[in-house]
Amino acid sequence: MTVVGWLQAAVVFALVCLLVKPVGAYMARVFEGERVFLSPVLAPVERGLYRLCRIDPAREMGWKPYAFSVVAFSLVSFLYLYVLLRVQAFLPLNPQGFGNLAPDLAWNTAVSFMTNTNWQFYSGESTMSYLSQMAGLGWHMFVSAGTGIAIAIALMRGLSRRSASTIGNFWVDLTRAVLYVLLPIAVVGSLLLLWQGVPQNFSGYTAVKTLEGAAQSIPQGPMASMEIIKELGTNGGGFVNANSASTWENPTGFSNLIELVCIFLIGGALTYTFGRYVKDQRQGWVLFAAMTTLFVAGFTAAYAAEAAGNPIVHALGVAGGNLEGKEARFGIAASALFATMTTDTSCGAVNAVHDSFTALGGLIPMFDMQLGEVVFGGVGSGFYGIIYYAILTVFIAGLMVGRTPEYLGKKIERREVQLAILAALVVPVFALVPAGIASVLPAGLATLNNAGPHGFSEILYAYSSMVNNNGSAFAGLSANAWWNVSGGVVMLFGRIAIMIPVIALAGALAAKRAVPATAGTFGTTSPIFVVLLIGVILIVGALTFFPADALGPIVEHLLNQQGKQF
């Protein structure tokens, strides 16, 4: 580890911290319908969309209509993308003449982008037309991220309202999330990436000859506009197969900085928005502090493991860190930072091959996802993930002091705890059960790139990524019908089966009356609560996933120490 490496991480996180307050305050005003500096331009567009879609912005929804709207919109979005991918060969903006996607691949891809996962069992530069990239995948990157933000805002309303029967209007929340938050930042960000050299055109691929005389095809296309929402919306789906490791999507150190800041931006800012909603900014900073602690610990462990290098290589007399699978222009520190941030959130973009990380270096991104991606998390999904952990924390604290637990002046009773537990169970159930099946099924083992514990890590990482709507991969796993179909099912349940309990939780909390704090009330703005919250997150994650992780990266690390490789 080097001073320069630590400075790189410090600069990125310092920029995130500087932006949390202004962006969080801006989002609070947007979702409460207050006037913002973009209102003169965007308010007429917003009203026009409501008229076109026959939406009454003043009509709020209870949790059931809100949940129904989320699910209905998601399923219609899925069908739209599935059909588009199945007929792309007959549509315009396809200069390379790419064919239609097979049914199982179209299913996997449509579910993947609808759920904000953006898992890719294809190479974008050799599979997707420009129309599919923009009107299909790019459009989903906006609306799936907007859906996550909308649900987070609904949960904030549930926590801040008293004896209410409504939690907002999904269509209004979605519209404002895309129109006022995602689009403006994406426009500015795409221009910055264009300045750095990311392509933005509709040209056909450029055929060139290398210095050695070999033929090479240089991808073109509308990359900059897709690249920025890939990071900002914590989507992760790359225009090309190499994702942010490629010089087309991420050509410079400055473009890498922009992408890293965008990954954490909205997830971090939502904690400040939360403080505004509940009228106690300390509540938001507590969540931010817990997220920050987990992030720093994860990055430190990943950076240390990669800087230490591979013991097998050291045994051959070669010193230094692990540079395998990393871009030389980024190096170990920026690669470890990107891997940590992209799995702390549900982004899934990569600027290095996680499959080539050391065993412990690969464990950290995997465990980040297995925690439920509550460390800043996806846009919206990270916030409501840490909220149900906060509810479990106050419940445990209440048991410790012998009182009915309270959170933000509301008693946490059986229904709230059941909904929080139901949401928390989705990740282990839909990661461990499919991973166990794939580990013994011939179809699941057929496309592994490695044997032994590393091969199991590839399987476990894949399902951990899919159920958490992350989308990153170890990159040692190839597609077949089993992985396309089972992966689509896991991604679908990983999104819907968490969102519905969270929306129900918002409705249950909104209906509750406030209870006055007493001397026995457990405070949720103290360092003690931060420690308890982190402890609950780590203990639940470790108890759930440690046995499986022990069979993968942990045993691989121990065997690497003995000179064995896989």
Image (spheres, rainbow, N blue to C red):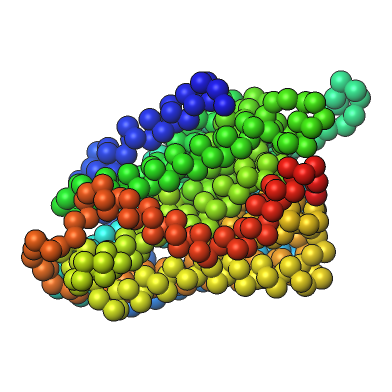
**Hey, which quadrant is residue 187 in on the image?**
top left
The residue sitting at 39% across, 76% down in the picture is 68
Residue 73, relative to residue 270: is it above or below? below
How many numbered discs sit on the rendered protein?
0
The quadrant the N terminus occupies is: top right
Percent of width and height locating residue 336: 58, 36
Percent of width and height locating residue 177: 36, 53
Percent of width and height locating residue 510: 21, 70
The residue sitting at 15% across, 62% down in the picture is 521
Q: Which of 189 and 408 is in front in this view?
A: 408
Left or right: residue 42 versus residue 305 is left
The residue sitting at 20% across, 71% down in the picture is 402
Q: Which of 92 and 264 is in front in this view?
A: 264
**Hey, which quadrant is residue 383 in on the image?**
bottom left
Residue 311, relative to residue 285: is it above or below? above
The answer to whether residue 412 is visible is: yes
Percent of width and height locating residue 157: 23, 62
The answer to whether residue 76 is visible is: no
Task: Single out the residue that lies furthest toward the front.
Answer: 562
The residue sitting at 35% across, 48% down in the picture is 290
Q: Nearer the viewer, residue 382 or 565?
A: 565
Left or right: residue 544 versus residue 130 is left
Task: Single out the residue that lies furthest toward the right.
Answer: 213
Left or right: residue 485 versus residue 513 is right
